[in-house]
Amino acid sequence: MDDAVAKSDEMLVEAVQNGDSELFGVLIERYQEKITRYGKRFLYQYEDVEDAVQDVFLKAYTNIQSFNLDNKFSPWIYRIAHNTFIDCIKKRGKENVPTVDPDIFFGNLRAEENPERELIDVEDEQALRQAIEELPPKYREPIILFFYEEKDYKDIGEIMHIPSSTVGVRIRRAKEKIKQSLNHG
Amino acid sequence: MDKEKETQKNTNLKADILHKIQAGEVEMRSKAHFMLKTLGFSIGTLFVLGVLLYLVSFIMFVLRANGILSLPSFGLPGVLILFSSLPWLLIIFAVILVVIVEILGRHFAFVYRQPLMYSIVGLLLLVGALGLIVEKSPLHSRVEAFVESRQIPLVRDVYKEYARPGFKAGGVVTITEITDSGFLVETRGGEMWTVSTSTQTRYPRFGDITVGDEVLIIGKRDEDAKTIEAVGLRPFDPNTLPPRPPKFKNEINR
């Protein structure tokens, strides 16, 4: 098990695929905090975050043979988390999650690729948190993934299955909405 | 204390999941399962794409067989008739298939990584180009002849409905007799009609029209009286038309 600590995520997945289920526990240790943090911010008003996080790992195990070892593991498990959390939102019916969004229609060449990771300079963290929570899911999620989970546009695009240019557009619009919300608040 | 609780929760989650795995409550799906799923998806997408391609080529075949694309040569009246004569039901069905192909395609990385407009335009260009190639081939003429000779229902009805009788405001006809007030004509569906002309009738690219010529006529049709008041009339190059299907299989062998 000490050897496992030195192994990369992808090497651990390969071992699990080959039958060493115990090593899946190491992957859980590595990603549980991240996925839980992502879930708590994305599903802020939902009480079943822990159940959802458990579902994420159960689905990851069930579908582990579909993982391509040439890819990175992190976007893959975040994609499973995205799908699970979106299902939670749809089940509750409190927020709208459209299947197709107009902003994936056109590429936006002006969307800055990976701007600075400073969300908004504000002293009141609570107000900022509330402003983020008020965003619709399609804007809230990329904000969380970029500024809190420190994913880049390409990874966020893989997680949300949208073009990376659309990621930039949504982050820019989300920041505008947050600023408006903070100014009115 | 909170940190201890958090650590305890974390350990519990890992222990719960590993216990479920060991107890067989959750099982790993096999690699074969995913390979079959991908294969099924790919085949399904290709099938829908194939149907779309056939439909697009059929629409092009219809436009050519009915002379619809020549209508703008009659000016504004021709353009207006063109829009009302397009096979809208087929076009709507083609649009639905494009949407289905896009939805299926979204499962593939090379599709969802691009803005939707790029994949739609790419799909339309691909299907348009391939559709043109298929349309230029004898495929539709042969299918038309086959379904006519074998009397295959539904497919025969579709070909009969769209490919031969012309369009609402006219069509391609053969001159059978020249009269004082116009012409007697035979439609591609085999019906005999009377065409009346006037000083208002347009004759773009007009040459001498003789008996036996195929002409494109637009005008006001009376289905009951089998008459057309010609608004426009022009010679039509029969080489651009698909050949007529034989009525019965026996006739091919005579």
Image (cartoon, helix red, strand yellow):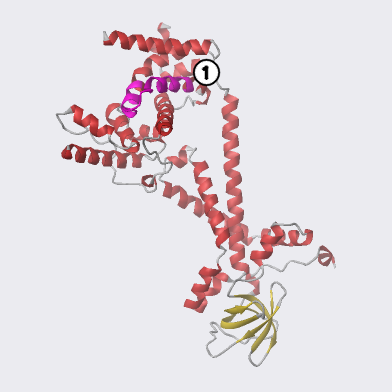
Q: Nearer the viewer, residue B121 or B226?
A: B226
| Location of residue B188 with respect to A182 vertically, above or below | below
Which range of residues does the magenta coloring cover? A36-59
| Location of residue B150 with respect to A66 vertically, above or below | below
Give x and y (percent) for residue B102: 50, 45
Residue depicted at x 78% and y 61%: B149
Asked if the magenta segment contains residue A53, the reply would be: yes
Q: Nearer the viewer, residue A103 or A40?
A: A40
Can residue B121 be seen here? yes
Can residue A20 be seen here? no
Give x and y (percent) for residue A46: 35, 26
Q: Nearer the viewer, residue B172 or B114?
A: B172
Q: Main secondary structure of the magenta part?
A: helix
Q: What residue did someone put label 1 on? A: A17
Q: Amino acid at mark 1?
A: Gln
In the image, taking residue A157 as reference, residue B100 lies left or right, namely right
Classify the position of the N terminus of chain A by image quarter. Answer: top left
Classify the position of the C terminus of chain A by image quarter. Answer: top left
Asked if the magenta segment contains residue B44, the reply would be: no
Q: Secondary structure at mark 1?
A: helix
Give x and y (percent) for residue A180: 20, 41
